[in-house]
């Protein structure tokens, strides 16, 4: 890093100039996400480039160690959160040393990001979608219990938008039914249930470090597990079935150990540039999450006077939620529609999104996968038809949050007078 420190001041000036230019030219006063990285991350990436160490190596390994120490377990970095889900799915298979077979059934909440679902499908599992609670946006335990069949071998839940369901009840149910529990934590980094981190309840969990997430490596993801065998299977699958990146490769006189392949595998390795970003961002994570949560509480208070018409997700008493975004659900008795709210906010320069991908059962892609089963999804349908979200930024944001408050107050004033 000493070689690139001379770039710090000019780089800081350049980045600040570009940041102001983006703000001035953007059509959004309140965008979905803002850049959270700065000079330290960029200098770390430049250091990797000028020293010609860009492939996965020391920085990635150090980031994995730091992440595992912080959240408890062995950490395996990959090039995206979607790849983390993918490796977890294939590491479950008997052919990879796991205990599940193609055709086994896995339960997945109907409101999640599509690659959570596709990963399991690509590994050959049968997927059954289960309903979510329209109040919490997370898994509905009753629906999940009713969906279990003789073929069900695992449950893969998602902690949507930073929230968590009753993990003690879910873990007890999975233990009773001998079901493998998996967690998609791509939107819940740092959230806790009864003091335990999201990602610490099941066999393995996935995390994402995409641009808009709690911490950023541009693209990037992580697998976390306390099972050493599972961790090694993921390392093999990450890089060609190659033993080189295992902590304890098996020696043999028959092969050059530097080029020994003991399994099939993908190539979803991250780069040292992503590792450099992760090392800096992890140090700032607690502070960024505190600011996110303070901004979320401002928005909670903003919509409270309008609770007859709109609500946000409810947080379980035992959950410490690190808000990923701020969802709003239009109540069925409101005099306006979801589309009315979206159009108004977008017109005032406030960027919106549906709640993730809505009800996946309604997505056109599922028509090509008749093996994905589901029953009545009342909660997911409600979220699909009535839910949107806006961003939450990990910085002190009073001016732009005040703009959101004024816009929402104006919107409700117009509709309550009609």
Image (cartoon, helix red, strand yellow):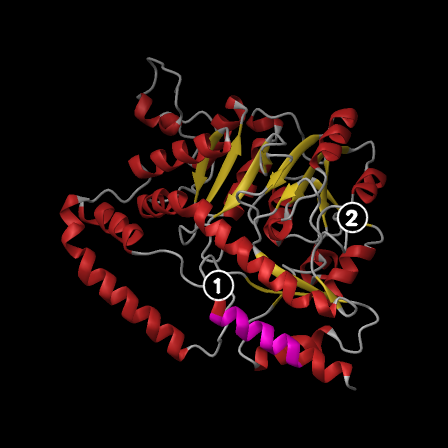
Residue neighbourhood size for the residue with mark 1, other residues' Cα within 10 Å, grouped as few (<14), some (14–19), many (≥20): some
Q: Are marks 2 and 1 in contact (CB under 8 Å)?
A: no
Relative to 365, 224 lies left or right = left
Relative to 159, 252 lies left or right = left
Q: Position of residue 37 (x, y in %)?
A: 36, 55
Identify the image quadrant of the N terminus: top left
Label whose residue precedes the other's in the sequence (2 or 1): 1
Q: Which residue is mark 2?
A: 373
Instruction: Check if residue 404 falls in the magenta segment.
Output: yes
Whole-angstrom CA distance, mark 2 to mark 1, is 34 Å
Q: Position of residue 116 (x, y in %)?
A: 61, 47
Q: Residue at x 54, y 56 (%)?
A: 294
Per the rendered image, the range of residues in magenta is: 399-410
209 or 399, which is in the foreground?
399
Q: Residue at x 24, y 45 (%)?
A: 48
Where residue 257 sits, quadrant-wise, is top left
Q: Position of residue 307 (x, y in %)?
A: 75, 66
Q: Residue at x 35, y 48 (%)?
A: 277
- Residue 33, label in figure: 1
């Amino acid at each position: 890093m000493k070689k690139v420190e001379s770039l710090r001041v000019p780089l800081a000036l350049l980045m600040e100039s570009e940041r102001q230019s983006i703000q001035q030219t953007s059509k959004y006063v309140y965008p979905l996400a803002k850049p959270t990285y700065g000079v330290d991350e960029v200098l770390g990436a430049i250091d990797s480039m000028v020293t010609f160490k860009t492939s996965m190596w020391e920085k990635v390994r150090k980031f994995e160690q730091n992440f595992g120490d912080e959240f408890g377990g062995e950490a395996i970095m990959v090039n995206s959160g979607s790849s983390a889900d993918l490796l977890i799915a294939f590491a479950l298979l008997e052919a990879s040393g796991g205990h599940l077979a193609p055709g086994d059934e896995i339960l997945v909440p109907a409101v999640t990001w599509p690659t959570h679902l596709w990963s399991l499908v690509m590994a050959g599992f049968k997927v059954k979608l289960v309903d979510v609670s329209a109040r919490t946006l997370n898994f509905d335990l009753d629906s999940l219990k009713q969906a279990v069949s003789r073929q069900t071998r695992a449950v893969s839940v998602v902690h949507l938008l930073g929230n968590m369901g009753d993990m003690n009840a879910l873990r007890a149910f999975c233990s009773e039914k001998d079901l493998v529990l998996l967690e998609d934590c791509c939107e819940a980094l740092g959230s806790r249930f009864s003091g335990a981190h999201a990602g610490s309840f099941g066999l393995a969990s996935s995390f994402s470090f995409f641009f808009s997430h709690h911490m950023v490596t541009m693209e990037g993801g992580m697998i976390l597990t306390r099972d050493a065998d599972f961790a090694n299977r993921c390392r093999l699958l990450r890089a060609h079935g190659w033993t080189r990146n295992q902590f304890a490769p098996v020696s043999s006189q028959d092969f050059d150990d530097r080029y020994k392949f003991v399994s099939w595998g993908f190539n979803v390795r991250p780069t040292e540039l992503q590792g450099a970003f992760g090392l800096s961002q992890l140090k700032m994570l607690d502070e960024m999450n505190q600011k996110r949560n303070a901004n979320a509480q401002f928005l909670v208070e903003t919509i409270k006077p309008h609770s007859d018409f709109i609500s946000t997700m409810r947080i379980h008493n035992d959950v410490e939620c690190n808000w990923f975004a701020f969802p709003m659900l239009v109540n069925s008795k409101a005099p306006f529609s979801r589309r009315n709210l979206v159009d108004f906010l977008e017109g005032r320069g406030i960027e919106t999104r549906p709640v993730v991908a809505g009800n996946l059962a309604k997505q056109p892609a599922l028509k090509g996968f008749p093996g994905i089963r589901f029953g009545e999804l009342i909660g997911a349908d409600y979220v699909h038809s009535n839910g949107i979200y806006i961003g939450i930024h990990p910085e002190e944001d009073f001016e732009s949050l005040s703009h959101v408050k004024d816009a929402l107050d104006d919107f409700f004033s117009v509709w309550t007078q009609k």
